[in-house]
Every structure is written in structure tokens, then in C-alpha cells.
Image (tube, grey):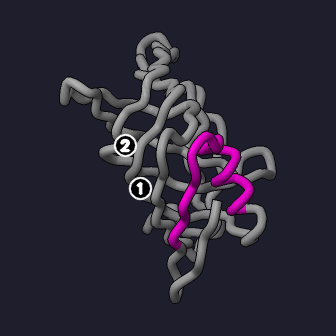
Amino acid sequence: MQYFRDGSSYFIRIDKDEDLFKSLESFAEAEELKCGHLSGIGALKDCELGFYHLHEKTYDRKMFKDEAELLSLDGNLSIFDGKPFFHIHTVLGGPDFSCFGGHLFSAKVAVTCEVNFRPLDIEMERQPNSDIGLNLLHFCNINPDT
């Protein structure tokens, strides 16, 4: 992985066979980042995607082992249990030009992954929400009425 900062944004290149989440977490720790937005393109493999069922409060999970074009990667960084936590959704493209996507649980880079990251000047933490069944964003030090 390599990255550079340009003004208030970062550009990150994650290399073949690197773990996407471990690379992003290492980047966030090295730069002492606590929240922000990311987007990216490239190619991934060994992807685990999920679809959340609110009424059951469970995910259907499916592994996609083969290489796939990373058509869209979109997510955010917050803090969960005191550590950087990336919440990412993705759309992947197969060799037959079909698309599939969902919540991204894990992935390795197949060719390259090019990520834009924009830090935010607020603090966000993940906190449990029993009605939803997930750890949702909590905006720290922000008036809830705004």
C-alpha cells in the first residue's frame, strides 16, 4: 500500500493480494484518522458480501472467490471499540458483465485498488441500536437537533 495527502484528502493505492480492510485500518492508524468518507475502484477477489434483513436482524452472506471488477466502493470511517472501523458497500462486476453488490465484510485486492479518502473534522462512533440490530453512527459533540 502507498498513499499521499493532497490538501485535506488522501489518495491510497492498495496492491495485489493485500487485505483491503487491514490496509485501510493501518492507513487510518498511521495517520491518526477517526472519521471520514471513502470511495474507490479497482479489482477485488475473495469478497464476502452481505444483505441485511431488518425483520430478522441478520445478514445473508455470500463469498465471491473469483476476481471481480470493483465498480464502486463507498463507505465511511468511524470509531468502534476504540479502533478505526470502516463501513463499506460495494458493487462488483463479473466477467459476463453482470453486477452484484452489498455490504462488504472482507476482500483482497485482485489487481489494484485506488481509494480516495476525505477526513472529516467531527468525531463519529459506532453504538449499538437494539431496534435496528446494528452498531449505528453516533455523532459525538454534535447537537442532535441539527
- Percent across and percent down for residue 43 are 42, 42
- Are the residues flagged by discs 2 and 1 in contact, CB closer than 8 Å? yes
Residue at the location (65% across, 35% down)? 128
* Front-lying residue, 139 or 75: 75
Q: Is residue 95 left or right of residue 65?
A: left
Q: Indicate whether residue 20 is drawn in magenta.
A: yes
Residue placed under numbered mark 1 in the picture: 40
Residue 53 vs 74, above or below: the answer is: above
**Magenta extent:** 11-28
Q: Residue 70, labelled with which disc?
A: 2
Question: Residue lying furthest left in this view?
Answer: 97
* Front-lying residue, 16 or 53: 16
Where on the picture, by quarter, is residue 109?
A: top right
Q: Indicate whether residue 107 is drawn in magenta.
A: no
Q: How many marks?
A: 2
Residue at the location (60% across, 63% down)? 35
Q: Is residue 60 left or right of residue 36?
A: left
